[in-house]
Amino acid sequence: MRKPKPKKTLVLLFCTIILCFVLCNRTPQADRIFTNGHIITMDEHMPEAEAFALDEGFIIDVGTNAEMREAYPLAEEVDLGGKDVMPGIIESHGHMLNLGRSEMRIDLQGVNDPREVVQKLRDRVAETAPGEWIDGWGWDDGAWKEQMTAISHELSAVSPDNPVWFAGLHGYNGWANAKALEMAGITKETPNPEGGKIYKDAGTDVPTGILANAAQGKVTRLMPPLTVGQREKAFEIAGEELLKNGLTSVHEARTTRNDLDALRSLKTKKKLKVRYYVMLDCTDKELIGPYLQNGPEIDPDNWLTVRCIKIFQDGSLGTRSALMLEPYSDAPDVLGVTTTSQEEIERLTTRSLQAGMQVATHAIGDRSNRITLDAYEASIRAVPGAKDHRLRIEHAQVVALEDIPRFKELDIVTSMQPPHATSDMPWAEDRVGPERIKGAYAWRSFLDADVRVPFNSDFPGETLNPFYGMYAAETRQSPEGKPEGGWYPEQCLTRKEVLHAYTVESAYSGFEEHIKGRIAPGMLADFIVISDNILTIPSKTLLSLKVERTYIGGQLVYSRNAEK
Ligand SMILES: [Zn+2]
């Protein structure tokens, strides 16, 4: 065979380079185009489309089938078969570790028969070695405290040799058996710790086992901590659950040092399942210290970003530990509890703003919200350079009406949970009375005041199914359609507003609106294929809407067909 002449080779090479240059310029690359869908983009420039193109995990173009085929002739084509597609939903306040663990612990959610609780414990004792801890989770600590107290003796009697801890659904109360109380040294004489309460029998003073807020630590600190391996497992289990429900990102609303270690380890192993936005537990000074010095840790791969400090100001409405301006309507001596003082919130917020970290403060009661607003206001004034601070209040559940405009004035991101309204509506008005209820779960009032409101579920206290949350936000009814016309229906939102709150606003609340929440050029290719047209289906149909497929970074990570 004759060797090509060097001159000829050079010419050939030159031509190839020119051709490449022309082709590359004319034909931007895409690895895949998704065509023949009904794409709900959440992008105001093009709200609906037929097709989009992806490259290296990002969306690079959106338009008609013909436009995508013409622009990317070399790309692989995926036929969506006329299905509805929307951006991956962002859970902007959830608790992944608790969700995963709830699968590993005795599940008491929705249990209404006290005998069933006793039976579940008896079964678990039978398969547990003496001395080993048993933990359960999910009894309704808002509504079920009396029932739990009534079976306290019986529960302790079936578990004489195992310490038992049953955490409440909302996390503000837990129940310990006699063995656990004994190990914690809790007796008739033990006084309430600061910020907590040890419930005792009115006649005998014997502790009932129910411990509220800070008192829970007396027992929980005795429990052996989960290993990193156990944590990783819990995060993985939770991640699978999210993908099934169409959630592609989560804001982990109280991350401990051990949790962060587990998340980092999962990231290294490429096993994170969903994208994380971490809110660090502010009570761990060693954990938050470096971030208050050096600022956020924004992941260039967009899987694990650490940018927020989580503070708890008060407790919960159900347990009357939410901090109120005036006493509870159904407990005239009770005002609620303070978990973090105004001075401490201000101090932490000022340092966070200086470092470029975000702060998210849990505030449920009207006094708690005011304290947090006051603290934020002082910090914003102290750090005038922090223009785009996006300070968050989590829940803003009961707010004095005159405080609502302050959320706008201070530009506070108000992170709310529609399922809380529908869960609490049977008793919320008993707690706060007919006047204060007007500022409760008042998302319409916030939107009317031009406040930014991301929606989320705060799972696992509530179902993580975002379509249930959407239903709750627009109907303010139970799944059975009660009450007729909705609970304080003037606070209902439209479908468009609700979808916006679960996507674009939730992305904004984590400084990620440039990469998440829409199907548009430059966005991460996180999207879901759903069973119906979410723009037009009646509210009730949201409850049966299914996620068919979930994609993260353009990769198929969940398919309902495969599961079946
Ligand atoms: Zn929470």
Image (cartoon, rainbow, N blue to C red):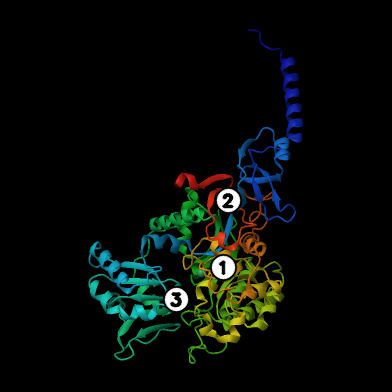
Cα distance between the residues tagged 1 and 2: 21 Å
Rendered image quadrant of residue 509: bottom right
Residue that numbered label 1 is attached to:
472
Amino acid carrying mark 3 in the image = Tyr
> 343 left or right of 405?
left
Q: Residues within 10 Å of mark 3 (few under 14, many from 20)?
A: many
Q: Which mark is residue 188?
A: none
Amino acid type of disc 2?
Answer: Ile
Q: Quadrant of residue 12?
A: top right
Q: Nearer the viewer, residue 71 or 371?
A: 71
Instruction: Report the residue marked by disc 3.
Output: 172
- Quadrant where the N terminus sits is top right
Left or right placement of residue 160 versus residue 536 in this view: left
Which sits earlier in the primary sequence, circle 1 or circle 2?
1
The reply to whether residue 361 is visible in this rendering is yes
Q: Looking at the image, which is closer to me, 487 or 289?
A: 487
| Residue at the image position 73 percent from the left and 29 percent from the top | 20
Q: Is residue 277 visible?
A: no
Residue under pointer 2: 528
Q: CA distance from mark 3 to mark 1?
A: 23 Å
Q: Secondary structure at mark 2?
A: strand
* Gap between marks 3 and 2 measured at Cα: 34 Å
Q: Nearer the viewer, mark 3 or mark 1?
A: 1
Q: Is mark 1 within 8 Å of ligand 1?
A: no
Q: Give the mark nearer the N terminus: 3 vs 2.
A: 3
